């Protein structure tokens, strides 16, 4: 049994130091709760599609990933974190898996980059998994799990992944009414499909907070982080809301 924390943390656009501090505190909280793995959101450093990515993105390994790696080592816990990565003239929407000793075991660059985000992010071109003491882990990011992109998740499962972890930034219009239009059916469909086909667990973790810059300025990220186990069984769904920060712990 693996104890996993879905870290539905607030991410504030462009405030890299504040966001990293929040991430470190969240990693510590997950370790204090005896979790084996903590999964943090997509682009937690500067926020998804925030224009500051063009200035603040760092290499991986580099200063930003080192903060995450050090926190993983300090608290002896596996960490998955979404970061923005700079390589030469390219910026990628990336995710890393860090071991309890602080080693980066796996890096994924988002492949299904939405058209609206391509002025910032280049497109990733690789998929891989990492064998760990907790099983074989695959990484992808948010829209990589769209119904039209499930070949990415299928490829990771075919590589042996029995746990698929996905940093996300799930956003809706500012006036979205979750009572009239409950959020999450797309992810329930996608995660359920993969979990049934390959008998694996899929976890997506979204941030919360208002989007304050970029093409989707004015929208809001609303959490609803989700764990779906084999057979499309919903194990946990975190709360909805722009202020719904939480550390949701699941056992899978």
Image (cartoon, rainbow, N blue to C red):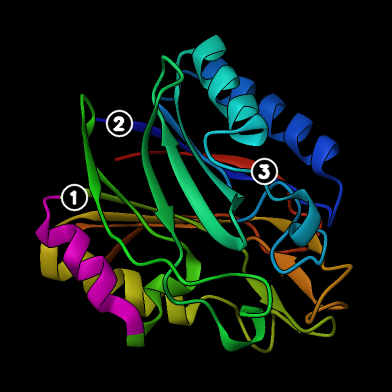
Distance of label 1 from label 2 (alpha carbons): 14 Å
Q: Residue at x 59, y 55 (%)?
A: 88
Q: Is residue 98 magenta?
A: no
Q: Earlier in the sequence, mark 3 or mark 1?
A: 1
Question: Where residue 161 is drawn, which disc sits there?
Answer: 1
Q: Residues within 10 Å of mark 2 (few under 14, many from 20)?
A: few
Residue sticking out furthest to the front? 88
Task: Please name the residue that numbered disc 2 is placed on.
Answer: 2
Foreground: disc 1 or disc 2: 1
Pick the quarter of the image with the C terminus.
Answer: top left
Foreground: disc 3 or disc 1: 1
Q: Main secondary structure of the magenta part?
A: helix
Give the answer, above or below, for where 140 lies relative to 246.
Answer: below
Q: Which residues are magenta?
A: 149-160
Question: Where residue 246 is drawn, which disc sits there?
Answer: 3
- Residue 28 visible in image: yes
- Residue 231 visible in image: no
């Amino acid at each position: 049994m693996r104890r996993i924390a879905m870290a539905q943390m607030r991410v504030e656009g462009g405030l890299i130091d504040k966001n990293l501090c929040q991430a470190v505190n969240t990693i510590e909280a997950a370790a204090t709760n005896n979790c084996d793995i903590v999964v943090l959101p997509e682009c937690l450093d500067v926020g998804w599609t925030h224009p500051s990515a063009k200035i603040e993105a760092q290499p991986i390994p580099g200063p930003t990933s080192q903060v995450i790696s050090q926190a993983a080592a300090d608290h002896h816990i596996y960490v998955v974190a979404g970061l923005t990565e700079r390589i030469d003239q390219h910026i990628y929407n990336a995710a890393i898996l860090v071991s309890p000793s602080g080693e980066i075991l796996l890096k994924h660059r988002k492949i299904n980059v939405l058209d609206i985000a391509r002025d910032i992010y280049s497109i990733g071109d690789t998929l891989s998994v990492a064998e760990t003491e907790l099983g074989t882990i695959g990484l992808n990011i948010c829209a990589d799990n769209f119904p039209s992109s499930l070949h990415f998740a299928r490829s990771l499962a075919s590589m042996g992944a029995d746990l698929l972890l996905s940093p996300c930034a799930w956003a809706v219009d500012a006036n979205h009414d979750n009572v009239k239009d409950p959020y999450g059916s797309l992810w329930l469909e996608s995660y359920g499909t993969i979990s049934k086909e390959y008998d694996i667990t899929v976890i997506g973790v979204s941030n919360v907070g208002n989007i304050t810059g970029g093409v989707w300025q004015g929208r809001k990220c609303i959490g609803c982080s989700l764990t779906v186990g084999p057979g499309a069984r919903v194990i946990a769904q975190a709360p909805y809301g722009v202020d719904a920060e939480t550390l949701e712990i699941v056992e899978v």
